[in-house]
Image (cartoon, rainbow, N blue to C red):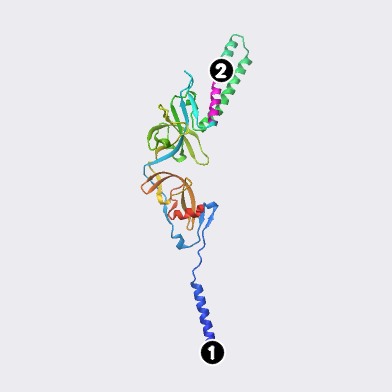
Amino acid sequence: MNKYIVIVFCLTAWACQKQTASEAPKAVQPPRVEEQGRKIVFTSDHKTLSFFTTDVVKKENISAQYAAPASIAVSIVQSSERGGRNTVLFDNADLNATYSQFLQHIINIHTLEVNLNRVKDLEQHGAATGKEVLDAETQLANEEAAITEQEAKLKLAGLDPARLKEPRNKEVWLICEVPENQIAQVKPGTPCVVTFTAFGDKQYSAVVNGIGAEVDNITRMVKVRVVMPNTSSQFEVGMFANVIFDLQKSNTLSVPVSALVNVQGKDYMFVETAPNQFERREVLIGQQLDDKVVVLHGLHEQDKIVVKGAMQLKGLSFGY
């Protein structure tokens, strides 16, 4: 009898142990963080994934502003010499050297043009040969070719070489950058508002003077030049500013502010690229309108962005 009791007890204990083991909760696997935090992959854990809420990016017809960080790249002041060329001050030593070479080429070209006309006149009177005329033409052509290098450097910096030939007294040139996909709305003559770090919230009306010669291969930004009068000499070369443009009046991408995270001055959002996978995207934002923010670059229509749980993904992506 005791033998049967022992057997029943053992079977009961084994059954209870098996049931307890089967009811034990499965350990939740931590998400995988890949590509230096750019991609976050979760296991198929519906409870964890249900914490994140997404929204589909759509285009809306709204008015938005874009504030472009800027600085005074050029300041033109009156020459100390009576009747002399106005002095151009740059915030960049390389540009200053480029401009000096540019001016020297202008002087050389003028001198060579005078010399060529003189040689041609001498040839007509039999005092010079055809070879001397050819040599003079070659020297002028070489100098005109040389100045194009300096002109290109000035244009790539967002400056206007033609205007720098005869710089106007007491004006400053601000250089800012506008996204490639917005540059069609910014043209010479486009009005804008400028605020300076040195002068608080005071606003100055200005207009766009010119557009840069290239699109940056990495940032996809285009330089924009804004020229302002400086009659009271209050603006100094190198001053920081913001240039505010009215952009995107229709078909604008806007998303909830809750989707936005900021790390070290850069803005990011997380896009759901698969049911359990999220991708970090750097974005360029425009004006905040109530609980939404305009996205100028970095997202596409129909992207699924995280609007709840973005801060948790930020911690996983950046490690804090």
Secondary structure beneath disc 1?
A: helix
| Amino acid type, residue under disc 2 in the picture | Thr
- At x 60%, y 20%, the residue is 139
Q: Which mark is residue 111?
A: 2
- Residue lying at the far top in this picture: please name it: 125
Q: Residues within 10 Å of mark 1 (few under 14, many from 20)?
A: few
User: Looking at the image, is 22 positioned above or below residue 50?
Assistant: below
Q: Residues within 10 Å of mark 2 (few under 14, many from 20)?
A: few
Find residue 263 and report its horizontal and vertical position in percent: 48, 48
* Residue under pointer 1: 2
Question: Where are the magenta residues, as a range?
Answer: 94-111
First of labels 1, 2 by sequence position: 1
Q: CA distance from mark 1 to mark 2?
A: 125 Å
Residue 173 occupies which quadrant of the picture? top left
| Amino acid type, residue under disc 1 in the picture | Asn
- At x 42%, y 40%, the residue is 67
User: Looking at the image, is 37 positioned above or below residue 286?
Assistant: below
Observer-nearest of 138 and 257: 257
Q: Nearer the viewer, mark 1 or mark 2?
A: 1
Q: Is residue 41 magenta?
A: no
Secondary structure beneath disc 2?
A: helix
Find residue 202 and report its horizontal and vertical position in percent: 37, 36
Find residue 185 and report its horizontal and vertical position in percent: 41, 37
Q: Are marks 1 and 2 in contact (CB under 8 Å)?
A: no
Horizontal relation, residue 134 to residue 313: left or right: right
- At x 54%, y 31%, the residue is 93
Q: Is residue 103 magenta?
A: yes
- Residue lying at the far bottom in this picture: please name it: 1
